[in-house]
C-alpha cells in the first residue's frame, strides 16, 4: 500500500492521516496546484485512495488495475461487493486497457459527450480485476471533463476506479468538506478544488447490445442520448427488493441511495400553504424540520428559519441539480431530523433529480 500504512478495525479502514491537498482549478499549472496533484498521483500509483473533484460529484479513486487498491475503496465506503464501480480514463490508451471492444454506439456517444458526465457500459478487459465490475463482464467507463480530474488521471498514468466519495448509501459529496464528513481518517487524501460544477452523478448507458439501455439518468438527459442512439430504452427497476439481482447491472441502482441522515419527505406539486402546514405539524411533534425551499415558494416566518436551504428556481433544473446534494448535506449538518423537499417536473434534467430524491426517500 506504499508508505501510507493502512489497517482494518472491524469493517472500517483507518489511515494514519487523510491529507487535504489544495488545487486551484483556475490555476492548475501553478506550483502549489501541481505539487498537490503530483502527491495525489503518486498515492494512486502506490495503491492509495484519493478523493478528487469531477464535474459531477467528488469521487473516491484508486488504481483500477490494482485489486488491493480497489478493495480499499469498498472498505472505506463500506460498499457492498455487488455494487460495481465506474472507471475514469483520460486517454484512448487508458480506455483500451479497461475495455476489450468499443461498440459503434459507444463511439458515437463518446464523440458526442466525452469528456463529460456520461458513463458507458463496455465489454471488460481481462486486465481489470473482477471486483471492479462485481464479477460482471461489462465495465462502466467515462472520461471526466473536470480539469483537475483529467490532470490527476494523466499524472497517475493509470485508469482510476472512482465511485462517489461518501459512505455507502449516503448523500453524494460536492465539496471536499463533505467527503471528510464521511471518510476522514479512512482514505489517504482528498483534493480540495471547490464545489463540483454539475452536482449530479453521470448518466449510465449500456452500449453492448442493441437497443442500448439507459440505466441511470444523469446530467446527460435521455433525450440527448436518444438524439445520438435513436433506439435507446430506459431501464425500469423491479418494484420489490426481493426481485433485485445479486449483482447490479449498473452503478447507482440500489433501491435506497443518496440518503441524508434526516428522514426525507417529498412533495409533488407543493404550494407554500401545504409546505407550511406540514412543517408546523412536524415541529409540533418535536421534529427539527429542514426545507429545501425553491425561490417560487415563500413561507413567511417559521420557528426555525436556520433550517431553510434556498434551493433556487424550480424552473432552473441545472441550478437545482448543482445544489441538491449540498442542500441535503447542509440541512443534515444544521440538525434537521426531517427534510421537506418539493419535486421538480418529471422531464429533462428533472428526471435525474427525481431519481436521486426518490431513492433517497426510500
Image (cartoon, rainbow, N blue to C red):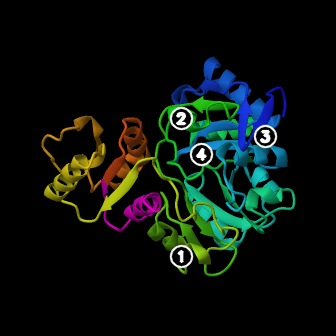
Q: Position of residue 358 (x, y in %)?
A: 42, 63
Mark 1 lies on residue: 240
Q: Which residues are magenta?
A: 341-362
Give the residue displayed 76% in from the left and 31% down from the top: 43
Question: Which quadrant of the rendered structure holds the C terminus?
Answer: bottom left
Alpha-carbon span between mark 4 and mark 1: 24 Å
Q: Is residue 18 toward the left or the right of residue 195 in the image?
A: right
Question: Does label 4 or label 1 sit earlier along the sequence?
Answer: 4
Alpha-carbon span between mark 4 and mark 2: 9 Å
Residue 167 is marked as 4
Alpha-carbon span between mark 1 and mark 3: 42 Å
Give the residue displayed 81% in from the left and 28% down from the top: 5
Residue 149 on the magenta span = no
Q: Is residue 249 toward the left or the right of residue 341 in the image?
A: right
Q: Looking at the image, can residue 343 be seen? A: no
Alpha-carbon span between mark 1 and mark 2: 32 Å
Amino acid at each position: 500500500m506504499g508508505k501510507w500504512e493502512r489497517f482494518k478495525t472491524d469493517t472500517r479502514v483507518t489511515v494514519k492521516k487523510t491529507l487535504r491537498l489544495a488545487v486551484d482549478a483556475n490555476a492548475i499549472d501553478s506550483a502549489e496546484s501541481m505539487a498537490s496533484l503530483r502527491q495525489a498521483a503518486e498515492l494512486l500509483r502506490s495503491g492509495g485512495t484519493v478523493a478528487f473533484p469531477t464535474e459531477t460529484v467528488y469521487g473516491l479513486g484508486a488504481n483500477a488495475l490494482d485489486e488491493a487498491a480497489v478493495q480499499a475503496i469498498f472498505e472505506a465506503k463500506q460498499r457492498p461487493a455487488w455494487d460495481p464501480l465506474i472507471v475514469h480514463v483520460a486517454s484512448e490508451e487508458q480506455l483500451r486497457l479497461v475495455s476489450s471492444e468499443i461498440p459503434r454506439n459507444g463511439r458515437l456517444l463518446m464523440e458526442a459527450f466525452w469528456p463529460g458526465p456520461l458513463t458507458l457500459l463496455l465489454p471488460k478487459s481481462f486486465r481489470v480485476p473482477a471486483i471492479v465490475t462485481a464479477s460482471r463482464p461489462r465495465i462502466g467507463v467515462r472520461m471526466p471533463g473536470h480539469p483537475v480530474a483529467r490532470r490527476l488521471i494523466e499524472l497517475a498514468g493509470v485508469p482510476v476506479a472512482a465511485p462517489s466519495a461518501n459512505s455507502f448509501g449516503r448523500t453524494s459529496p460536492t465539496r471536499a468538506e463533505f467527503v471528510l464528513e464521511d471518510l476522514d481518517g479512512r482514505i489517504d487524501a482528498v483534493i480540495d478544488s471547490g464545489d463540483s460544477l454539475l452536482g449530479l452523478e453521470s448518466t449510465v448507458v449500456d452500449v453492448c447490445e442493441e437497443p442500448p439501455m439507459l440505466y441511470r439518468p444523469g446530467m446527460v438527459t435521455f433525450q440527448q442520448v436518444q438524439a445520438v442512439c435513436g433506439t435507446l430504452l430506459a431501464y425500469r427497476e423491479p418494484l420489490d427488493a426481493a426481485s433485485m439481482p445479486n449483482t447490479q447491472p449498473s452503478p447507482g441502482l440500489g433501491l435506497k441511495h443518496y440518503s441524508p441522515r434526516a428522514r426525507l419527505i417529498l412533495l409533488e406539486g407543493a404550494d407554500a400553504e401545504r409546505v407550511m402546514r406540514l412543517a408546523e405539524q412536524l415541529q409540533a411533534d418535536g421534529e427539527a424540520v429542514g426545507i429545501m425551499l425553491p425561490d417560487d415558494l415563500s413561507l413567511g416566518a417559521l420557528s426555525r428559519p436556520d433550517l431553510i436551504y434556498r434551493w433556487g428556481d424550480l424552473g432552473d433544473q441545472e441550478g437545482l441539480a448543482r445544489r441538491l446534494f449540498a442542500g441535503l448535506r447542509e440541512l443534515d449538518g444544521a440538525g434537521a431530523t426531517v427534510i421537506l423537499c418539493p419535486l421538480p417536473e418529471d422531464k429533462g434534467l428533472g428526471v435525474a433529480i427525481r431519481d436521486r430524491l426518490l431513492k433517497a426517500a426510500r
